[in-house]
Image (cartoon, rainbow, N blue to C red):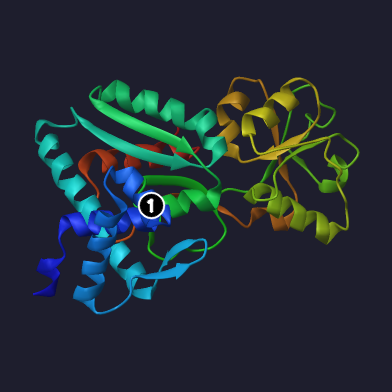
Amino acid sequence: MLSYRLQDTALRYFLEVVRGGSVTEAATRLNVSPSAVSRQVAALEDMLGLPLFERRPRGMVPSPAGELLAAHARRGALEADRVVADIQALQGLRRGRVRVCSSGGFAVEFLPRAIALFTAQHPGMQIHLRAAAPAAVTQAVLDGDTDIGLTYSRTAERDIEVQHRQVSPVIAVMRPDHPLAHLHSVTLAQMHPHPIALPEADNTARQLFDIACSHRRLVFEPVMVSSQFEALLNFVRHGGGLSIGGEVTVRERIRRGELHAATLRERAVSGRTLEVQTLAGRTLPEGVRAFVDHLGALLSPATSP
């Protein structure tokens, strides 16, 4: 059968071209000659009878057939990783690696704390954490570059399985001595007179905040804009004014009394969810499954220790 002739080397070289966008880039990553990569890709195209890439001036983009083959190859690679992890798991969760990609706010405190709690129970487990923009987190899951994605979402994503979901409205964040800190909820009109620091426009909290401002016909002129969530929090901590975020990302600082959070009484800011994402159709290794369950338990305010 044709499926048996899809060799590991050819698929591995093909995937590197998909990731790098060129034969030269793939060859560099694989430490082989560009001609070796080209031969493997050409052999796959001859075998399947279809072009796998569209050759463009700025690189190579997978064709529809290439997209299907890439999805197959990624799942095959992940399945091989799972088998190895499950063999190691015969000793229990003593060894293993879990790759996590999250949007920036979760990587500041929530995930480091979650990882510390998890590895205290399972000392042999290793967690690889990286932060990215919300859309890039989902793409990393789809590409097989991470096992678990933790991010905010406003729409359903194809080929993504949501392991945990909860509503995550935008909140106003301030110091406990801020003039609005006696309030448990605030309106945009109440926030408007005060200095504010906002995330960049690709941030989901910022997008919903801007929609709510448009509905209210209010224009905020932020004194600071940053893609770094920690920078926004430090602006607030040093008395600069207000900022916005999600409850989970500031939960521990509120619990310690370092910050105060107020719900935004604006319907538009409730239109997003927090999601723990994995690749649909993938059987998760035991270690990844255990960490997914661990995150689900910690994320809910009612059960967070």
Q: Position of residue 253 (x, y in %)?
A: 60, 24
- The residue depicted at 31 percent of the width and 56 percent of the height is 15
Q: Report the amino acid beneath label 1.
A: Thr
Horizontally, residue 201 falls left or right of residue 99, namely right
Can residue 73 be seen here? The reply is yes
- The residue depicted at 22 percent of the width and 45 percent of the height is 285
Quadrant location, the N terminus: bottom left
Q: Position of residue 269 (x, y in %)?
A: 69, 53
Q: Residue 40 sits in which quadrant?
A: bottom left
Q: Position of residue 4 (x, y in %)?
A: 10, 67
Horizontally, residue 67 falls left or right of residue 131, namely left
Quadrant location, the C terminus: top left
Element assignment for label 1: helix
Q: Which residue is mark 1?
A: 24
Horizontally, residue 128 falls left or right of residue 172, namely left
Q: Position of residue 193 (x, y in %)?
A: 91, 38
Can residue 282 be seen here? The reply is no
